[in-house]
Amino acid sequence: MSKSESGEYQSLRPQPGPIGELFAPVAGFGVTLSSMFRPTVTEQYPREKVPTQRRFHGRHQLNRYADGLEKCIGCELCAWACPADAIYVEGASNAALPENAGLQVNADDSQGAHMSPGERYGGVYQINYLRCIFCGLCIEACPTRALTMTNDFELAGKTRAGMIYEKQDLLAPLSEGMLAAPHPMVEGSTDTNYYSGDVLGPTAAQVDWVREHRPDDETLDAADAVASGRAPAPEQRQHELRPDEGPGAAERSAGAASVGSVRVLASDAAGSNRPGVTA
Ligand code: SF4
Ligand code: SF4
């Protein structure tokens, strides 16, 4: 608006001519009409799921080495790095595993049962997804690349406690050819060999150890094929969507209908008083 010499305010906007005034009442439909002939961009979620960008920050995953041992060493660096206090970790000693009862297993000994290479593993691991802001600082802090983030964004729950994901919810599934832990490290190796990527799959000695201690283990046959050279080395997966099979899959599909991962832990119904992060 500007003030004229006569003292009246006048609009600075160009005034429509006679034709403009004629179509003024329906001018707003111009946007609608022009949009009608453009390609549809509406995503039909959840019936159609559009892939995220590759580096999307979704649900976390605890990864494994190619022989099936866990990468997490229970160091708690991820928990200390988290600005939202969303992670709770309790480290545990490999030497204290039940399979090592009565054995003299040293901290850096590759023999005896191990959940992860070296001295310790993550005994308790929880992430509270009511607190997590998906900043990724935890995965930057992890010294072994045990912790990464997947593209799984379907995180919802019916209870607050159910949004605390436990270790079994976060652990990467065993790829074909991996040997389920616990079992000894590759004979003669150190944790440095694991970090350096020297371990490419299970060995015959590891397969024999598991066969002796858990003869019914379902991963034995595939691991034996890798160890004897009849099958290729297992694939180490780090950034995949959560599989539709494995631990928790039934809960997710039952609770989520077509929307995704609504989950209620059995312990929630019992009102358990779990340690660690609170809801
Ligand atoms: S992504 Fe950020 S907020 Fe979430 S657990 Fe990791 S550090 Fe904490
Ligand atoms: S995920 Fe990484 S940083 Fe966190 S406890 Fe395990 S090894 Fe340490």
Image (cartoon, rainbow, N blue to C red):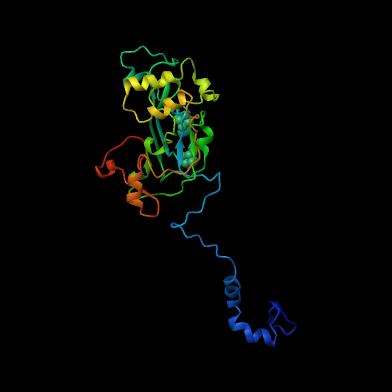
Can residue 69 be seen here? no
Locate residue 170 relative to residue 142 in the image: left or right.
left
The image quarter containing residue 86 is: top left
Q: Percent x, y for residue 43? A: 50, 60
Q: Percent x, y for residue 39? A: 58, 65
- The residue most toward the front is 230
Q: Percent x, y for residue 199? A: 51, 24
The image quarter containing residue 278 is: top left
- The residue most toward the right is 5
Q: Percent x, y for residue 225? A: 44, 27
Q: Quadrant of the C terminus?
A: top left
Residue nearest the viewer, comparing 42 with 200: 200
Above or below, 37 against 202 in this view is below
Residue nearest the viewer, comparing 34 with 279: 34
- Residue at (51%, 26%) from the top-left corner? 200
- Residue at (33%, 45%) from the top-left corner? 250
- Residue at (40%, 54%) from the top-left corner? 259
Locate residue 160 relative to residue 270 in the image: left or right.
right
Residue nearest the viewer, comparing 70 with 93: 70
Can residue 116 be seen here? yes
Locate residue 215 relative to residue 154 in the image: left or right.
left
Locate residue 141 relative to residue 120 in the image: left or right.
right
Above or below, 4 against 191 in this view is below
Total numbered badges shown on the rendered structure: 0
- The residue most toward the left is 270
Above or below, 34 against 116 in this view is below
Q: Quadrant of the N terminus?
A: bottom right
